[in-house]
Image: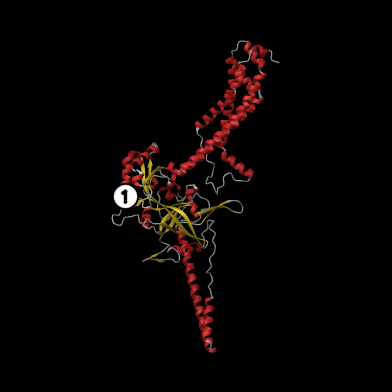
Amino acid sequence: MYKVLLCWRYLRTRWIALASIISVTLGVATLVVVNSVMDGFAKEMNDRIHGILSDIVVESHSMTGIRNPELWKQEIQNVLGDRMQGITTVITVPAMMTFQFNGASHTQQINLIGIDTGSYANVSDFSQYLLHPENRKQIEFALRESGYAPDREGFPECGWLYRIVMARRQKAEAEMRLEMERNAELRNAQLRSALATVNRANGTEEQGSKNSESKTQSIAFPGSEHRNEDLSDGNLPSSNHFAQQASMGPTVGASSTEVGSFRFDPEKETHTGIVLGIGIGSIRYRDPMGKAVERYVLRPGDDISVAMPGTGTPPRVIDGLFTVVDFYESKMSEYDSTFAFVPIERLQQLLGMVDPQSGDKAVTSIQIKVKPSVNLDQARNELRQAFPPEHTLVHVNTWKDSQGPLLAAVQLETTILNILLFMIIAVAGFGILATFFMIVVEKTRDIGILKSLGAPGPGIASIFLGYGLLLGAVGSGAGALLGLVFTWKINSVARWIEWFTGREVFDPTVYYFTKIPTVIHPWMIVWVVLGAMAIAVLASVLPSIRAARMHPVRALRYE
């Protein structure tokens, strides 16, 4: 009992022990906060990556793809059995997208992905990242009437209403330009006739005719110049934005345009639908006031042109017209700025991946989703044995294999941070060590009295070991509590820091987080607390050994 009483007395009366407790508290709190934030970032990143990537991918090495995918799907079903939850076929091809904006043609590289609308949602969380609520329930490559991104502030008007208004405005402007051209031609004809009459009267008809031609060629009608449009707000732009796409295809240029042997009416028809990553159709930047702004250069309802390499020999460039029907936002900039999704049937037709004789279709990959309890590595290895790459020219990878370097980098960063922060607690441990040596020196006479009363050496040592354990328990417990509270209120703290410093903690033009993600693992807190207590106990070992070995007579004669 005397051991506990002495430990508590030393802890209460020594102010220097309070400094050691504070050191342990701050170290533990920092570890809890950093691990919670890093785990939150890692979970958010894993969820977003896994949201677009299926569990296992069987991918072809060549552009010709995997022939007879139904036979492959059946073989995969035989290998995995009831462990498989979903399967779909996908075509992925690099492509170049062209669109018109502010009177200029812009070209951007994209990854064009052909998906099966009936089964793709079974292997990934693709649908939940679409902006239109109806597409989240069931993806359709059809232009919706309106209602895009109802929970997104400042999202511009788009959909069929936007497309019809733009087509009508463009038709009116086209008719106006045509009328101007006719009036200009009429005026030019009248001018040429008048000049010819004057020249005949003067006998200089030939020279006057040349002058007439030169003058009429210099006459231009008004309204032929382009106007720059600002699409950053939610208002409908002028029809110039819609009319600028005339160079890409039949959707624009008139109310209805000849396309091959039929007439295409943009007020009633669309091209094949395409879902663009939101980073393709918008630009994030800061305005002069420093506010983050998202400017949309494309909207659902606009038409684009896409060029891609064909699968023939030799390969040739194939292009097609598409209508933007929705945006995809996974909040992973690598995906949102490059991925574009189209129906797999249309892509197979464009690329020539359909056998004209047998009707067999080819794909570039087969994506598989397995049940949550299945070991991905084991399933991958079984599929690799069933489809050896040296014979089938395919490789089988899990989603973690494809993102291995990124995930490894995050894990390495977390490990290094933990080591550095534990070194901070170790510094506090050296402070505890120095404090205990000083206490042993100051309590030399007390130690001598205890030994003269019959206290054994291990009993004296246990006093200081218990003192270190109690100090570590108090410091780590307070640190864990402080870290949990800080993690709980971290977004409020971030807003306070932003107000105080005038700078944003997370730049929204770079990060897609509306708030700092955190994940608290109970076992992480337990290990941090136990580690801090172990450091405090180890720091008290040497002073306790010195106190235990002290001779009672010499201790009583001290000072």
In this rendered view, identify the residue nearer to me: 71 or 495: 71
The answer to whether 433 is drawn above or below residue 201 in the figure is: above
| Left or right for 307, reference 295 | left
Residue at image coords 66%, 18%:
443
Amino acid carrying mark 1 in the image? Asn
Residue at image coords 45%, 62%:
248
**Looking at the image, can residue 185 be seen?**
yes
Q: In the rendered image, which quarter contains the N terminus?
A: top right
Give the image's coloring scheme. secondary structure
For residue 470, what is the image quadrant?
top right
| Left or right for 158, reference 89 | right
Residue at image coords 51%, 57%:
297
| Left or right for 195, reference 124 | right
Image coordinates of residue 370 in percent, x first then y, are: 38, 40
Residue at image coords 54%, 62%:
228
Seen as rendered, the residue at the extreme front is 390
Image coordinates of residue 542 in percent, x first then y, are: 60, 21
In this rendered view, identify the residue nearer to me: 414 or 3: 414
Name the residue that disc number 1 marks: 68
Seen as rendered, the residue at the extreme left is 358
Q: In the rendered image, which quarter contains the C terminus?
A: top right
The answer to whether 37 is drawn above or below residue 281 in the figure is: above
The answer to whether 470 is drawn above or below residue 122 in the figure is: above
Seen as rendered, the residue at the extreme right is 559
Image coordinates of residue 467 in percent, x first then y, are: 60, 21
**Looking at the image, can residue 161 be seen?**
no
As helix, strand or loop, the secondary structure at mark 1 comes to loop
In this rendered view, identify the residue nearer to me: 431 or 148: 431
Label 1 CA crowd tier, 10 Å (few <14, some 14–19, many 20+): few
